[in-house]
Amino acid sequence: MATLLLRSRRLHRSLRHRARPTVDVLLRAGSHGARLLYPDHIPTTPLQKMLLAAGAAGMALYNPYRHDMVAVLGETTGCYTLKFLRDQMKKDPEGAQILQERPRISLSTLDLSKLQSLPEGSLGREYLRFLNSNKVSPDTRAPTRFVDDEELAYVIQRYREVHDMLHTLLGMPTNMLGEVVVKWFEAVQTGLPMCILGALFGPIRLRAQSLQVLFSELIPWAIQNGRRAPCVLNIYYEQRWEQPLTALREELGISPPPKHIQGLA
């Protein structure tokens, strides 16, 4: 079951050694001499952030699967929201521990054999099942580049890396309908502008049947769960792999997902 993830890991390693996009080169040249706060940091001015945000928003709306553009949009528009999320984490014991220890979710940190050996229905086993069933890898999450604060850069990186965990918690697939539902949940939970934009404009590409289910059932369900659940960034998922998924949902106040979501796109 872990073969696909291992292949994705090798592919990701090869992609990391390719040349960065031209926009990265230009911005790094323009920020020559500026102090770098973390390895992939690209210091940018407010004007540069505005231009990046506008371009990323247009591209993300044109192609919602351009995760690199979604990432840029989140980094260039979420400064104040990230500060709020960081403060929420500091007030929570589990969240504060995450901020202190800075865990990362990637194929290099995951013990796939251990996750595979966990009991059926456990968080770790269901998370691994989600990755394999949807042919996704945690290594596809882009590194933070445009956040000019080292701690906030980690907060948005953590948000990206637990995104697939939220899919698992909510029982949502990675098709367009599932992504929109998760974005509604994230918009309520985090208030990040990119999540709000994704929630509002994502449905444009859905079919009529999916739209009907989305507006009549799934959006109200996502909003209700998003409001009821505590901040999902305060959950140290790596220490809860053995916890039954149903128990974690009950702890967070997340009701079971609608049964017919898998048949829609």
Image (cartoon, helix red, strand yellow):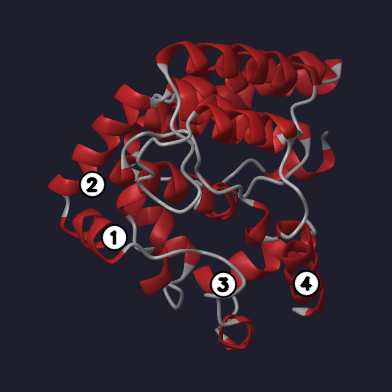
For marks 2 and 4 on the same chain, the one whose residue lies earlier in the sequence: 4
Q: What amino acid is at disc 2?
A: Met
For marks 1 and 4 on the same chain, the one whose residue lies earlier in the sequence: 4
**Label 1: few (<14), some (14–19) or many (≥20) C-alpha neighbours in 10 Å:** many
Q: Quadrant of residue 248?
A: bottom left
Instruction: Confirm or deny contact between disc 1 and disc 2 (CB under 8 A).
Output: yes
Check the image and report above or below for 92 versus 210: below
For residue 221, side relative to residue 155 (left or right):
right
Q: In which quarter of the image is residue 176?
A: top right
Q: Residue at x 56, y 17 (%)?
A: 53
Q: What amino acid is at disc 1?
A: Ile
Mark 1 to mark 3 CA distance (whole Å): 25 Å
Instruction: Confirm or deny contact between disc 2 and disc 3 (CB under 8 A).
Output: no
For marks 1 and 3 on the same chain, the one whose residue lies earlier in the sequence: 1
- The residue that label 4 is drawn on is 10
- Mark 4 against mark 3, which lies toward the viewer? 4
- The residue that label 2 is drawn on is 89
Give SS at disc 3: loop
Q: Residue at x 48, y 24 (%)?
A: 76
